[in-house]
């Protein structure tokens, strides 16, 4: 899970920018005739960006304004899915640090978060370690470091980091990361408790941007969706959409919710609204599957081709959701296998091993897939997708009892974790 919440180190930069846009410091954003109504947050943000771009251009040696500009680019990237803004955030943060390395934790925090959002984990780890060394008492910095260690599969380091933060679960920069760790080690109920409490605190926090409020609803809704609580998922995602009507992440989650309910036209509606903001290949694939379920195979194939075109130029490994889609649809299997194996050289987490197992299974290399799957299950994660994959691999190896056990566990935990995999699991159980 890439970091999506602004830490206190980022918040200072974001809020200082907001003051300029409201006119508190006499900036252009607050000048001119006004109606007395507040500007839309996205408009305020863009005015802030323009304001700090101008200040940076006039002051080639400044550091603080570059750190504020970097934080604003990062915020816009999170709201719009813009990779270009992630690169701008990284560049502005690096420029700020070149101008002043000391006492510049805000820029270092933006740098670590922008690298993490780009899935450049080794570089993000280096920046996060430097940040934690400079701010040893900052819970947000330690939580960010733990998150990156978790993403890289360094679970002993992550365990130590999150154990040291257990008493800080009321911190909005810490609680979502503690929740992700709890889910990973097989405690989804604890993850749910942490996220609901964090959401409630976030909604009561003054000055929190709408995108951040939506994100807390999204985290609760996404967890509920993964564990089959579809009514709760609906309530949370609708609340997220009310806070941020154009958030592509929320729209994509609503498309997944409608897809698992087999409400295909609604899935198409939400998915196409998400794609209009950010061309996410996983959502393209979902919309393609929805059209296929509606019987429009030509349009489905159009979306599948668009997905493949959109990821053809992706540097490095594919996003995990894209890789799963390609494997499930029998597309680019050798290419996905090669990319997954390459990524595991540096990022050895359980979902990387699950992808490797699934790619090997789809390649007919079931014994190798079984070995990788054992590593994917090593933390005791309660995830129906993992158990479905484990059951399918066991069935391919003729281990019928193991296959039944895994498949029944997946369906018992969440009979609708995906719009098509549960049906495949039931069919495989029937065949066994």
Image: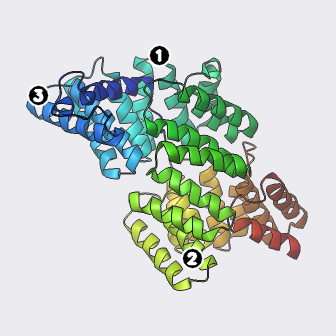
Look at the picture and state if 332 lies above or below 116. Answer: below
Image disc number at residue 136: 1
Image disc number at residue 376: none
Image disc number at residue 291: 2
Q: Residues within 10 Å of mark 1 (few under 14, many from 20)?
A: few
Q: Residues within 10 Å of mark 2 (few under 14, many from 20)?
A: many
Look at the picture and state if 106 lies above or below 215. Answer: above
Numbered disc 1: secondary structure: loop
Question: Of label 3 and label 1, which has the lower sequence position?
Answer: 3
Q: Residue furthest left?
A: 58
Residue 19, quarter of picture: top left
Numbered disc 3: secondary structure: loop
Look at the picture and state if 98 lies above or below 261. Answer: above
In space, the residues marked 3 and 1 are separated at their CA atoms by: 31 Å
Image disc number at residue 59: 3
Query: What percent of the width, then of the height, locates residue 275?
Result: 44, 62
Q: Is residue 381 visible?
A: yes
The front one of 94 and 258 is 258
Numbered disc 2: secondary structure: helix
Q: Residue furthest top?
A: 137
Look at the picture and state if 387 lies above or below 90. Answer: below
In space, the residues marked 2 and 1 are separated at their CA atoms by: 52 Å
The front one of 70 and 259 is 259
Q: Residue furthest right?
A: 401
- Name the residue located 45 percent from the left edge and 37 percent from the top edge: 210
Q: Residues within 10 Å of mark 3 (few under 14, many from 20)?
A: few
């Amino acid at each position: 899970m890439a970091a999506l919440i602004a830490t206190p180190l980022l918040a200072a930069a974001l809020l200082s920018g907001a003051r300029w846009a409201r006119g508190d410091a006499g900036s252009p954003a607050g000048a001119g005739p006004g109606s007395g109504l507040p500007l839309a947050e996205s408009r305020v943000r863009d005015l802030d960006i323009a304001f700090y771009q101008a200040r940076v251009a006039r002051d080639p040696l400044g550091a603080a304004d570059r750190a504020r500009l970097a934080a604003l680019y990062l915020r816009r990237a999170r709201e719009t899915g813009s990779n270009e803004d992630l690169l701008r955030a990284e560049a502005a943060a690096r420029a700020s640090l070149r101008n002043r390395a000391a006492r510049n934790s805000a820029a270092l925090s933006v740098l670590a978060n922008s690298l993490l959002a780009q899935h450049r984990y080794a570089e993000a780890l280096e920046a996060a370690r430097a940040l934690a060394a400079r701010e040893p008492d900052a819970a947000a910095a330690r939580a960010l470091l733990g998150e990156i260690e978790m993403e890289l599969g360094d679970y002993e380091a992550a365990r130590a980091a999150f154990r040291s933060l257990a008493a800080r679960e009321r911190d909005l920069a810490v609680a979502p990361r503690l929740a992700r760790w709890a889910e990973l080690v097989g405690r989804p109920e604890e993850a749910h408790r942490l996220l609901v409490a964090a959401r409630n605190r976030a909604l009561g926090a003054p000055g929190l941007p709408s995108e951040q409020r939506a994100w807390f609803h999204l985290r609760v809704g996404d967890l509920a969706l993964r564990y089959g609580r579809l009514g709760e998922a609906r309530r949370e995602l609708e609340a997220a959409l009310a806070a941020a009507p154009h958030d592509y992440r929320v729209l994509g989650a609503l498309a997944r919710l409608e897809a698992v309910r087999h409400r295909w036209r609604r899935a198409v509606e939400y998915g196409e609204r998400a794609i209009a903001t950010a061309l996410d290949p996983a959502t393209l694939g979902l919309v393609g599957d929805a059209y296929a379920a509606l019987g429009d195979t030509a349009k489905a194939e159009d979306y599948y081709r668009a997905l493949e075109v959109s990821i053809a130029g992706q540097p490095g490994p594919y996003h995990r959701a894209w890789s799963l889609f390609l494997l499930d649809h029998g597309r680019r299997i050798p290419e996905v296998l090669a990319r997954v194996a390459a990524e595991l050289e540096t990022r050895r987490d359980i979902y990387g091993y699950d992808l490797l197992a699934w790619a090997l299974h789809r390649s007919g290399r079931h014994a190798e897939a079984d070995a990788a799957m054992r590593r994917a299950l090593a933390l005791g994660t309660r995830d129906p997708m993992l158990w479905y994959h484990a059951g399918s691999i066991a069935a391919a190896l003729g281990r019928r009892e193991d296959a039944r056990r895994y498949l029944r566990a997946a369906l018992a935990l969440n009979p609708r974790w995906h719009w098509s995999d549960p049906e495949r699991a039931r069919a495989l159980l029937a065949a066994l």
